[in-house]
Amino acid sequence: MSSSHSSVDAVVVGAGFGGLYALYCLRQMGFSALCFEGGDGVGGTWYWNRYPGARCDVESLQYSYSFSPELDQEWTWSEKYSPQPEILAYANHVADRFDLRRDIRFETRVTAATFDEARALWTVETDRGDCVAARFVMMAVGCLSAANKPPFEGIEDFRGPIYHTGEWPQEGVDFTGQRVAVIGTGSSAIQSIPLIAAEAKALTVFQRTPSYTVPAYNAKLDPDYVARVKADYPALRAKARSRPTGFYFPFNAQPALEATPEERQRQYEEAWARGGLPFLGAYGDLLFNKQANDTIADFARSKIRSIVKDPGTAELLSPDNVFGCKRLCVDTDYYATFNKPHVKLVDVSKTPIERFTAEGVVVAGKTYPADAVVCATGFAAMTGSYDKMRITGRGGLTLAEKWAAGPRTYLGVASAGFPNLFMITGPGSPSVLASMIQAIEQHVDWMVDLMAHMRDTGARTFEPKVADEDAWVEHVNEVSQVSLRSTCSSWYVGANVPGRPRVFMPYIGGFPVYVQKCNEVMDTGYDGFVLD
Ligand code: N01
């Protein structure tokens, strides 16, 4: 079908895990759909983030779709935390297996979506001149997709290549024999630095804020273990969905402060030895009680001192903020990399990067020479991809105007004034605080159910009521205060990009609570929405 001037039930924006599942479900429910994707392949995050060491830090047996028992059985992950190429291969397999590609237009970006109130239709425009009329638009644009590229002074003078981890060249990069500068020390940097260091002649890491990171202890998956999981996959999926994070791991509900210091030490050592994000499950109160959090933060800092030989570097690498407040990182040999003689850490917390020159990066008047620069500077999280499109709702109001002081949604699925516009894992939903694929499946299932309900009842539009949206925004904000996660400058609150409003964007009340709320809304005939 030519898409230049056509009409479908739904336009899906993005062919990552959200967009692929949306396409699948729309077809299953008998809706026509067309998907636009900026890349030349499917996979979204896993298409773009090809930097060395990129892998998911939710276990692969759980970081996968659950909608198809056949898919669960036929796909076999090779490692506990699969590397990016394998996750991308999985996305491609899903696209082929369910014949999704025929409705995807690649290398095509949506530039605008405009709601026509009289016809109750969206007009979706692309950078290739498409102009598609659709009853519904499903934004599957990802939460961490709009690269944050700080406008460093003199950046255009630098004579070498500058890479962003989130826009890595498909052909890969060979740093052998080069002097490399990495800016940033979040998850992407922490995964890539040990591998870049293994190739580079010299590596300089510019750190504004140190991150806490826990060893992954990644390993090949034991086929017997995989067979046991596959023998009762639904049980694992159900256990995962019952957890606040949407994925299953051993969790000790006991408060840290009720344990003796010796017991805590033992518990932290055991949890550290298991590694990964489940380290935060060592006690139940770590994200709610600062005193409890101090105990795990002290333990993590002692680990850094035990690994990093130079005391000054160990000190610089040691965060002094709440453990787990910023997204916890998971690594392989990150701290040990700083013991290598050709790896240097530069603190830019008090003296920011001054400028780039042809030769390298300047801090406090000193030039750090580099042949290549890697910006591991993260993303304009949650709303960045929406900002790139001109989305115009009722009365000519744009979404950017409506969200100028922070995103406003009901349940993170839709925003008043923008009828029939779905946001998959939108701000105000658990999204990045849940296992993303489980969050995507729950959202899309709920959305297509609403579309089918509208078809059955003859409704043309759905739209949140302003009062319910306001109450939800208030609730999202209120529950965020209960957690220590709201207390630091993280991308969860938009603090990593200057000028963005500071609002805690994901819903932190827990995945099961959120799912229950969505189901209640559905069961009450979509309470909080106007169906017209
Ligand atoms: O980005 P980040 P990321 N000058 O925002 C620094 C997911 N993810 O791509 O902290 C100097 O975390 C910035 O400093 P500060 C995961 O959810 C998952 O690493 O703002 N430095 C920070 O150190 C993750 O949390 C996986 O002070 C500047 C870094 O750049 C999210 O994606 C893997 C700067 C950015 O860190 C984002 O991770 C990778 C400046 N002007 C990512 N501007 C897995 O599943 C920014 N920084 C494994």
Image: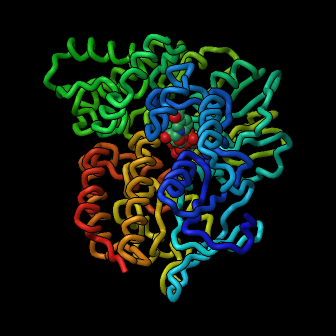
Find residue 353 and report its horizontal and vertical position in percent: 65, 45
Q: Residue furthest left?
A: 258
Q: Residue furthest bottom?
A: 118
Which quarter shows the N terminus?
bottom right
Q: Is residue 352 in view?
A: no
Q: With 419 as the anchor, is 163 left or right in this view?
A: right
Find residue 241 and report its horizontal and vertical position in percent: 32, 38
Q: Residue at x 27, y 48 (%)?
A: 509
- For the residue pair 232 and 19, the one nearer the viewer reads as 232
Instruction: Using the rendered view, name the quadrant where residue 69 is placed.
Output: top left
Q: Residue at x 59, y 62 (%)?
A: 33
Instruction: Using the rendered view, name the quadrant where residue 97 is placed.
Output: top right
Visual colour scheme: rainbow
Ligand 1's quadrant:
top right
Q: Is residue 217 above or below residue 69?
A: above
Q: Is residue 108 above or below residue 84?
A: below
- For the residue pair 91 and 405, the one nearer the viewer reads as 91
Q: Residue at x 51, y 15 (%)?
A: 221
Find residue 201 and report its horizontal and vertical position in percent: 78, 21
Q: Residue at x 47, y 61 (%)?
A: 423
Find residue 328 and report its horizontal and vertical position in percent: 43, 33
Which quarter shows the C terminus?
bottom left
Q: Is residue 449 in view?
A: yes
Q: Is residue 459 above or below residue 332?
A: below
